[in-house]
Amino acid sequence: MKKTALLIMLLIGFLQIQLSFGQSTITYYDSIFVKKMVDIDKYETDTFTVKSSQVQKQVLIGTTFLTASDKLIQLTNHGLYPISLELLKDCNNTTDPDTFEDYPKFIEVKRDSLTLTIDVEVVANCCHNFLGEAEVKGKDTLNLVYTSYGGHCMCNCVFTLRYKFDTRMEQSDYYPILKYVTINGSKTTGKIPNP
């Protein structure tokens, strides 16, 4: 009996070794290009690779939406889909620091048949980029969210951000049309034009 059990265990072990070594896996990689400023109007470009997989950690570089964050996923339940977050104007350090308390400011809020585009000026550290999200507050207010991040410089300045959303689903009878926009929950409010 002991010899039979030992023989069976050895056979199972041998089969497991054969099966595991007989399998091959293919791993795909994504290339990521990084542009870094090294001097005024001079940049260096570098490349690195990461494994392609939805379960791998995401790489966040520059100004971008926080892809698949809880807030952005919930936003689709209100008929909006994030398209892009861009830095329209880099650091404007000519703005009087005494006026920083007047920010954020909505520069333009426009809607066409398929998109909602919102340009807003915000104050942040001169060396920062931005990570963005958005959420619906109440029944009719879109709250834009941003977090500035990056290296720390000894100055603050005004940046212009552009949030862009796909509104095709919002225009169905199922979703209410949003009327107002705020940023980071501030009291500053913009009006969203009707479709």
Image (cartoon, rainbow, N blue to C red):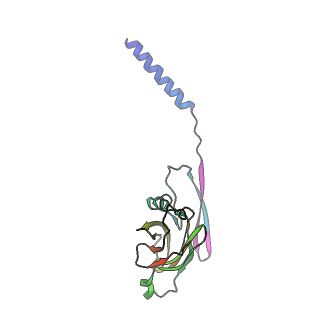
Magenta span covers which residues? 23-43
Q: Position of residue 5 (x, y in %)?
A: 40, 16
Extreme front residue here?
173
Give the image quarter of residue 24. Answer: top right
Q: 126 or 84: nearer the eye?
A: 84
Q: Position of residue 117 (x, y in %)?
A: 56, 72
| Magenta-colored stretch includes residue 28 | yes
Give the image quarter of residue 103. Answer: bottom left
Q: 91 or 138: nearer the eye?
A: 138
Residue 45, compared with residue 8, is above or below; it is below
Q: 143 or 64: nearer the eye?
A: 143
Extreme top residue here?
1
Q: Main secondary structure of the magenta part?
A: strand
Placement of the C terminus among the 4 image quadrants: bottom right
Look at 51% across and 83% down and name the residue there: 93
Look at 62% across and 76% down and name the residue there: 41
| Magenta-colored stretch includes residue 163 | no
Residue 14, compared with residue 111, is above or below; it is above
* In this picture, residue 68 sits left or right of residue 46: left
Placement of the N terminus among the 4 image quadrants: top left
User: Is residue 45 at least partly visible in the picture?
Assistant: yes
Look at 46% across and 22% down and name the residue there: 12
Q: Position of residue 2 (x, y in %)?
A: 37, 13
Residue 16, compared with residue 108, is above or below; it is above
In this figure, what is the number of numbered marks? 0
User: Is residue 146 at least partly visible in the picture?
Assistant: no
Look at 48% across and 78% down and name the residue there: 190
Q: Position of residue 114 (x, y in %)?
A: 60, 66
* In this picture, residue 116 sits left or right of residue 148: right
